[in-house]
């Protein structure tokens, strides 16, 4: 999907379809799949625009800052991994600027949904 004008429901459908078609046997992917709705709706609340970079990477702008969402191994209690929202440069290939938010479990994903802040 190219463009910026699509709903959170469509975004969730795209990611879940990708995960279940390509990563269904990967345990950490199954673990974070339940978080996606919370995270995507939270991002929808704060974003000015969003788009998909590559097949599976959510990118969005808030004000003049750009972010991407990514899975990172070895994060959080018990080192089970989590989702990071990382501030990125304005042009492709620039290094990441900072980690804006980290989500380690379903309750943190729900908290981000209720009060989306980066």
Image (cartoon, rainbow, N blue to C red):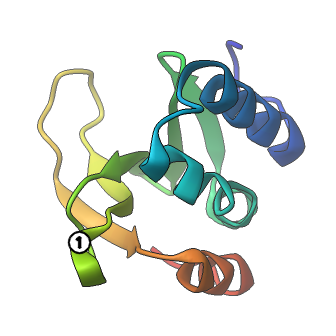
Where's residue 61, x and y in %? Answer: 51, 47
Where's residue 86, x and y in %? Answer: 31, 54
Task: Answer with left or right where residue 3 lies relative to residue 117.
Answer: right
Where's residue 88, x and y in %? Answer: 27, 44
- Residue drawn at x 53%, y 33% as measured from the top left: 25
Give the image quarter of residue 111.
bottom right
Task: Answer with left or right where residue 79 lies relative to residue 107.
Answer: left
> Which one is in front, 114 or 117?
114
Task: Answer with left or right where residue 79 lies relative to residue 80.
Answer: left
From this view, report whether residue 49 is shown above or below residue 97: above
Task: Answer with left or right where residue 23 lies relative to residue 97.
Answer: right
- Residue drawn at x 68%, y 81% as measured from the top left: 110
> Which one is in front, 29 or 12?
29
Q: Which residue lies under the disc numbered 1? A: 79
Q: Could you tell me which secondary element the residue under label 1 belongs to? A: helix
Q: Quadrant of the C terminus?
A: bottom left
């Amino acid at each position: 999907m190219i463009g910026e004008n699509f709903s959170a429901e469509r975004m969730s459908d795209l990611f879940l379809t990708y995960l279940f078609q390509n990563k269904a046997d990967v345990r950490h992917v199954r673990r974070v799949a339940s978080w996606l709705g919370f995270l995507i709706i939270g991002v929808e609340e704060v974003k000015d625009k969003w788009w998909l970079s590559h097949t599976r990477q959510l990118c969005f702008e808030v004000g003049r800052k750009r972010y991407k969402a990514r899975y990172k191994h070895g994060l959080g209690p018990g080192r089970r991994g989590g989702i990071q929202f990382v501030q990125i440069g304005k042009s492709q290939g620039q290094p990441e600027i900072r980690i804006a938010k980290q989500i380690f479990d379903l309750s943190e994903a729900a908290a981000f949904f209720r009060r989306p802040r980066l």
